[in-house]
Amino acid sequence: MKVEVCAGSVQDCIVAQAQGADRIELNNALFLGGLTPSVATLTEAKKHVAIPIITMVRARAGGFHYTDVEMKTMFEDAKILIEYGTDGIVFGFLNADNTIDEIWTKVFVDLAHEHGIEAIYHRAFDRTPDAQAAIEALIRCGIDRVLTSGLETTADEGIPTLKMLQENYGTQIEICVGAGVNAENINEILDETKATQVHSSFKGWFNDPTTSSSKVSYRYDQSGDYEGVDAKKLQTFMEVLMKREG
């Protein structure tokens, strides 16, 4: 079983490794669903952790049907992240009808594989109308792994589709289960889907005394000032997995 932690900072990466994670997906702006991180964040994280770090390549919030300028920008971002040592690039491109954009997907796959790193398709997959058609498109493009909740809001809701994907396609493409995965539901998800990889942010909220005053606030969520990996949540999750694996 591999555990991938969705990280938004160098500190998140340090916590992830300390608690036994197998891999990190590095992002910026997780409250927007994750955007491309800075090169400095990647290089600093690589100084502090030894486990693989894959990096998000996403130009903006919202959906995944991009302009030519956005696509070219993301392609340049991907090349720079590869130059500075990412272990994989994470991306997702859709046509206007929510089907997989196979042309651009193949371009990014080829870029990754030319440099000996992984090409991962993110949860843009969960906006597609047909899971089987979408996974077959990704396989044609040469994608190494897809992150998915089974086309539902959360992974536990998507169990039937996740099970189908793992059973029918798990030998052709890696299936990483994500969205709402936690210590309370992981056993059910694994029992039902037979998944071998899971992804979670293990989100906690942290305080910064300079965030708000009676007149001005930079808080974007009432739960706290900024989010990050909660070491205790991740530790508890890993303990559940260790108990499961005996």
Image (tube, grey):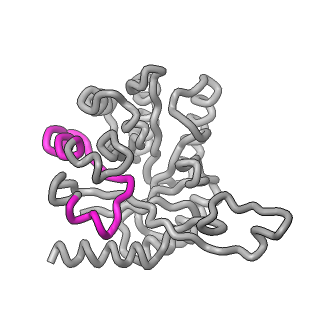
Residue 35 seen by the camera = yes
Q: Residue at x 59, y 67 (%)?
A: 223
Residue 140 seen by the camera = no
As drawn, the residue found furthest toward the front would be 214
Task: Give the side of residue 151 with respect to residue 42, left or right.
Answer: left
Task: Give the side of residue 1 with respect to residue 74, left or right.
Answer: left
Q: Residue at x 16, y 54 (%)?
A: 192
Q: Residue at x 50, y 51 (%)?
A: 55
Question: Split into 4 quadrants, where in the image is the N terminus?
Answer: bottom left
Q: Residue at x 57, y 70 (%)?
A: 205
Q: Position of residue 52 (x, y in %)?
A: 41, 61
Q: Quadrant of residue 50?
A: bottom left
Q: Position of residue 137 (x, y in %)?
A: 30, 27
Q: Quadrant of residue 208?
A: bottom right
Task: Give the side of residue 158 with respect to residue 210, left or right.
Answer: left
- Looking at the picture, does residue 97 appear above or below residue 157? above
Examine the structure image and report whether residue 165 is included in the region drawn in magenta.
yes
Question: Split into 4 quadrants, where in the image is the C terminus?
Answer: bottom left
Task: Give the side of residue 12 with respect to residue 208, left or right.
Answer: left
- Region of the chain picked out in magenta, as a range: 161-188
Front-most of 138 and 232?
232
As drawn, the residue found furthest toward the right would be 215
